[in-house]
Image: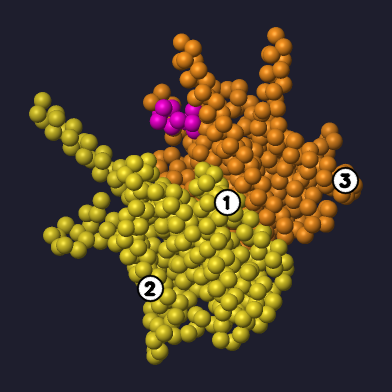
Amino acid sequence: MAVKVNSKISYIFKKREFGIFLFILILLAIFGSIEPRFFRSDNLSAILSSVGILMVVGAGQTLVIVTRNIDLSVGSTLGMAAMVMGMVARSRPDFPIMGLILIAMVVGGICGLINGFLVSFGKIPSIIATLGTLAIFRGAVFLVSDNVQIDPEDVPKDIISLATTSPIGIPWLLIFALLAIVLVWFVSSQTLLGKRIYAVGSNPEGAISRGLSFNRITIMVFVFIGVLAGLGGVLYTARYATINPADVGRGLEFDVISAVVIGGTNIFGGSGTALGTALGCFLIGILSNGLTVVGVSPFWKACATGFLILLAVAIDNLVRRRQEENFLLAIRNQRVAK
Amino acid sequence: MSTLSKSPSRFKVPGYLIGPILILTVAMVYGSLGSEYFLQPSSIIFNTGRYIEIGLLALALTFVIINGDIDLSVASTLAASAGVLAKLFSGGVPIFWCCVAAIFTGFILGLINGLIVIKLGLPSLVVTLATLALYRGLTQVMLGDKVVANYPESFVGFDQRLVIGGNPGLPAPLTLFFVAAIIFYFILHKSNYGIKNIMSGSNPSSSKFSGIDVNRVRLIAFTLSGTVSGICAVMITSRLGSTISNVGLGLELLAITVVVLGGTDIFGGRGAISGTVVSLFAIMAVREALVIQDLNGQVQDAAIGLLLILTVLVPRIRSYYVEKRNRQKRFNEAQAKA
């Protein structure tokens, strides 16, 4: 039937991700037409590497927000992981790079585990628990490092090359980011675990009464975002080559949550996709870079981001309301037909 | 919950005050061990000047949080109001009208927050996250990287002024805070609006059915929070004697910490002004005690983050064990009967 093909196409058009994709294309067209240098390869790779760090952490944040939680401590977790890794690298320059990455991920995972325990067994609302650990982990970075930064000459060359070398045309940094997104996509749409995560998010009481372990899933997503924030710490080190205890990862939580929300994840849990988050990260990265390139004062950047979040949630809300109305209407029509 | 005193005295310390009072006491003892000057009244009173803005923000936030909402944009609202003040002042407007305009700006920005949340039906967490960026961005657009200073002598140094002279005198900010606390106490606990506020926070739908205009109550709370941010903008400008675009950066987290530490439920429906007041002084004492030990700001914040988590966690653990013991007791009684 023709209707079927038609509905398939309209399905793609109706997809939320398509809207963001369209918006990105429009932005690219605007920036490109004002300033052709926007499309130069060095500018594009600058965008990609800034998006990479955002995307790795955003992938984890998507799952956390899907379970009705929020992790405000990602910036500090990233800082903690990067700092510990940098200190190991400084004291033992011949440490293998895989070992360093593993250390960063384990440190991040431990931070995530602490958050997970506080939220699940401690029954502390995640926004408070991670508000606390945001400060605690940042303080820990200072105590661990004794307020001494890691200088570029102490960072192993192999780590820095993650940002500069590109095996298949894309830098390693972005490959890691894409792997994280694919992993979240795979887990959330192809596995039973993913179904459980979404179930806990959309109806916690129902999920528990169906025998799902609420605590286990909560801890799992927090450890997952911790590990990814640890990986983000590696990528941060690769990109900036300096780890300053005050600067590393500061304010990252805001950008990450913005990207996830723009990507269509419902802040009340239960829905959200990895693809949407990836596009949200690209949107933020392109916007902040493009504004600078076309010569708009960088002071407008925060304004634009804030406005974008409002726009995204407002449209989302409108669509959701329309869908609900249609759903109710369809049910009524069915009843009438009977 | 409070079983602290078993004596039949009529005065009981409410449960939510136990944590902050304990923290306050311990910090006082610890600080006085560090320096003999710590407990001198004059040093205590003059150290308060830096915390009064946080305290005022927290008082207004108490209303918002009791409603089950949150306002992350308070610090950015403060910055935008301070920006308006500075911009008008450098344009030659008399300082009095600059202050009026700053407070009015706060009022408008708070009103905008409330209207977006209520009219569009969006979650306040996301909306105020967006306006956090938006208002800060507006400030940056207004001020750029300029510093506005040279305020008239009569305007600067509000925190150095004394309402009651002598040694130790009563400085103006502290007086203002106490007056504000008393007013807010009467609004929240003795007035019609306060009762509506607590009711609509604890059960919005049943409040709606009993004739409370929940949305209006929430709108008033948001507007109040914005207005107080405007007042704080005037105070902070007077105290610092200059304005830059990152004024008050990160104050929102401290203010929320004060509110939550004071026993206000982050999910709404419960809270008290007395808790906010005591917890402000507790946080102040902790920070000052750590300053004497020569620890930097990040570690002070970490200590406060830890206290925040502990004040929420310890009562949970305690009630868990009490419940467990009661269950065991009931089980034993049932066994004995059988």
Q: Which mark is residue B178?
A: 2
Q: Nearer the viewer, residue B183 or B140?
A: B183
Q: Which mark is residue A33?
A: 3
Magenta segment: A199-208
Do callouts 1 and 3 point to residues on the same chain? no
Question: Residue A184 appears at what percent x and percent y?
Answer: 63, 31
Pointer 1 chain: B
Pointer 3 chain: A
Instruction: Decide whether residue B270 is among the magenta residues.
Output: no
Read off the residue under disc 1.
Answer: B129
The reply to whether callout 1 and callout 2 are in contact (CB within 8 Å) is: no
Secondary structure beneath disc 3? helix
Q: Which mark is residue A309?
A: none
* Amino acid type indicated by mark 1: Leu
Pointer 2 chain: B
* Amino acid type indicated by mark 2: Phe
* Mark toward the viewer: 2 or 3: 3
Instruction: Decide whether residue A200 is among the magenta residues.
Output: yes
From the rendered image, report the letter of the chain displayed in yellow.
Answer: B
